[in-house]
Image (tube, helix red, strand yellow):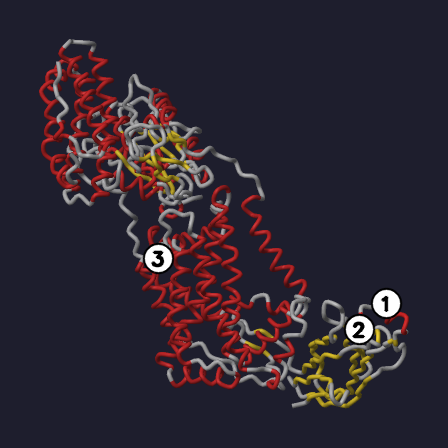
Amino acid sequence: MTLIKWQPSFSLGIPSVDHEHRELIGAINTVYDSMVSNVNPEIIESCLEDIYADVSSHFALEERHMRDAGYEEYEAHKEQHEDLLDQIRSMMDLFEEDPESGRIILQQELSDWFSIHFATFDARLHHKLGDHH
Amino acid sequence: MFFELLRRFLDRGFGSELNPLNHLGALTIYFFWIVTISGIWLFLFFKTSVSGAYESVEYLTHEQWYLGGVMRSLHRYASDAAIITLALHMIREFVYDRYRGNRWFSWVTGIPLLWMVFPLGITGYWLVWDQLAWYVALTSAELLDWFPVFSDSMARNFLSLDALSNRFFTLMAFVHLIGLPLFLVFGIWLHVLRINGPRINPPRVLMAGSLAAMTVLSFSWPALSQGEVDMAQVPQSLGLDWYYLLVYPLMKTWSPAWVWGLLFGVSLLLFAAPWLPPQRSKSAAAVDLDNCNGCSRCADDCPFGAITMMERSDGKAYEKEAVVDPSLCMSCAMCVGSCPTATPFRRHSALSPGIDMPDLSAATLRETILKVSRKLTGNCRILVFGCEGHDKTAKLKSGLNDNETATVDIICVAQLPPSFIDFVLSRDLAEGVVLAGCAGGECLYRFGEQWTGLRIERQRDPRLRKRVDADRIALAWQEPWSGLSDTTTVVAALRNSLPAGDIAEQGADEKISLPPARENAWKLPLTIAAYTLFMVIVGWLSVWPRYQLIEQNQAMVSLSFSHAGHHIRECRKLTQEELNKLPPNMRKADDCPRERLPVRIAFSSDGNTLYEASRPPTGLWNDGESNVYHRMVIPAGKQKLFIGMIDSRREEGFDYSLEQEVDFLPGQHVVVEFDSIQQSFIFKVE
């Protein structure tokens, strides 16, 4: 079962960023699948930790490209990134303390994190960086 | 430790951020700009001729005192100040051991700058063409004459006004105005080439302050010329600019060879300094391409420009990758602190950041944190991260460790990624974290305090997560050699402020505040005192103590002439037979040797020999004239002078001589010349 599906509209036209988006979607889907299939919470936790590291560096790269392109909404987008990283960290801590409620909340929030991120900010960045189809 | 005392004094007045000692290089460049701008004004009014030079400077100083005079004074005082900051800059980098290893380039490229700055100042004093200028010209020429480059003696130009041409001033002006400054600007560019984000401009407050101080000095104690050149009368004493002319008085007793030996020796020593005592070599940062996506944060943070973002080389879907130049890397580890993948939250996958230090990896750091925190007990546990700078951690360890406090060594505080702090606090490894590093400009790697501070304040990437309670973090910026007290205070203060045993999350949006700075009522007086001291030192050494050129009852004699010795043998008529052997176009009737005999000189006063020498012929084939140049100080009063010269193989007596009684007035300068047309000596008494 797949939580998020890659859509052409996600593409920013920057190969590295698109590549990481695809990988992240893959990682999120894996976490989601493992949650649904009730695997050991520790595995989910370590997946979350890896996602945290990957998302951190992904945002660093994306911010780089935004700055290079002179993206005018950089600050707002950057804030969104910081908030999202805070949310992931909170989720990691929650899982550490109480894996069961963590599982429930994560299931609800997981797809929101990224779909909102894609739908709002990245879409605007997409326009900024120009047509590339 | 004079330097440390000075630093503390200035710290009190200016604060660490604005401490002039942290901006010495930039201040020197700033003074150079002041010198350039005031110099342009002076040039507008300067006349490059023997008679015009002194007059035009006098005009500027007295008629146009409100502008030209001030410009002249600023020109002098800023160049003097530049020597002070330059010297301190060198001492500081040396004392802080910031000249070795990969920093050799900046150190070594600094030395030629010295060799440009000093001649720049010296030619400047020359152009004024007052009595000091005459002394400077004469002594400089005597120094330069030591090099067997000029066939004629240059010093002789400065013994009589007839010998000096306007052309010489044009040449000097060219060297002073265009030649040396041009090289200097290029040299400065080279000097800071390898430094990432070099500080070229000092803080505005310091610019304004020092300019104001020098302006006050210029109005209250303007730079003045020291009397028109009178070659017949030697000034007894001169106000010497000790900043530029420090070695000149040595010429009174030392030979030029010794003076040059000193200058070259010191320069060589400076050149060799980075390699003299072998330095412990640390391994450079290493990039792990599997974890690098080319975000270039490390390249942004590297204080030494050692990281460049290059075309991706491993075929992955990324555009760039970080590449470390090991010959530039100072192993400060700030790049690790900037790498987004350096998060300690990794239970299963290995903690290997995109860039890491082989000597102290992020994974090792996490292990150490886990290990030392396990030993801590109580509900106010504090983990102190101390940098290696100035051997502080060694002190930290012995002084701070107890069952509630543990120290972790890191290379530089900026090595610690903010996520590690998140890790320590959220995983309940400690209740508080202290980062102990070197204050501001004391950082061995330049940006340690800056980057750390900004990351914790969430103003620079990677930012500390907002969810981390900033009240649990304290920064302790230490001055080198200041001992433990500061860090101990910070640790104690943090411990007091921590709600005991309460690990609950709190509203964590507050800005990190350092322990309240000591209220410093002395700040203003000390700042003023520092500027006053600066003014006094700049002004004082630029003319005082006066240099005693000759004693009250002394006079001076210079021997200055050139004369060709006889050829080593007589010309000889070639025989017909010999001529026939030569090619037709080379059949010259006489065979004359080109080589000449040395010229022997004896000079005495009242029968006491003052100078005796055999001067070799000049020229590559020893076929030129012999130069005689010698300057000596003699007692004033009536005395019988004798000069004799031999230009042949004669064993006894002299070919030319002159004996005459001369009554020397104190300070009088007599030049002994040889009239080549009359073939006789003259005691030139003007």
Q: Is any atom of residue B471 visible in this view?
A: no
| Mark 2 or mark 3, whichever is nearer to me | 2
Whole-percent x, y for residue B266 in the image: 59, 55
Q: Is residue B553 left or right of residue B194?
A: right
Q: Which residue is mark 2?
A: B596
Identified by mark 3, the residue type is Pro
Q: Which residue is mark 1?
A: B581
Towards the viewer: B566 or B555: B566
Residue B638 against residue B142 in the figure, above or below: below
Q: Residue at x 12, y 35 (%)?
A: A123
Whole-percent x, y for residue B349 in the image: 31, 19
Question: Disc 3: which chain?
Answer: B
Q: Secondary structure at mark 3?
A: loop
Q: Is residue B57 left or right of residue B610?
A: left
Q: Residue at x 72, y 75 (%)?
A: B627
Q: Are marks 2 and 3 on the same chain?
A: yes
Q: Which residue is mark 3?
A: B202
Q: Residue at x 12, y 21 (%)?
A: A4
Q: Earlier in the sequence, mark 1 or mark 3?
A: 3
Q: Is residue B680 left or right of residue A105?
A: right
| Mark 1 or mark 3, whichever is nearer to me | 1
Q: Is residue B416 left or right of residue B587?
A: left
Q: Residue at x 44, y 68 (%)?
A: B536
Q: Secondary structure at mark 2?
A: loop
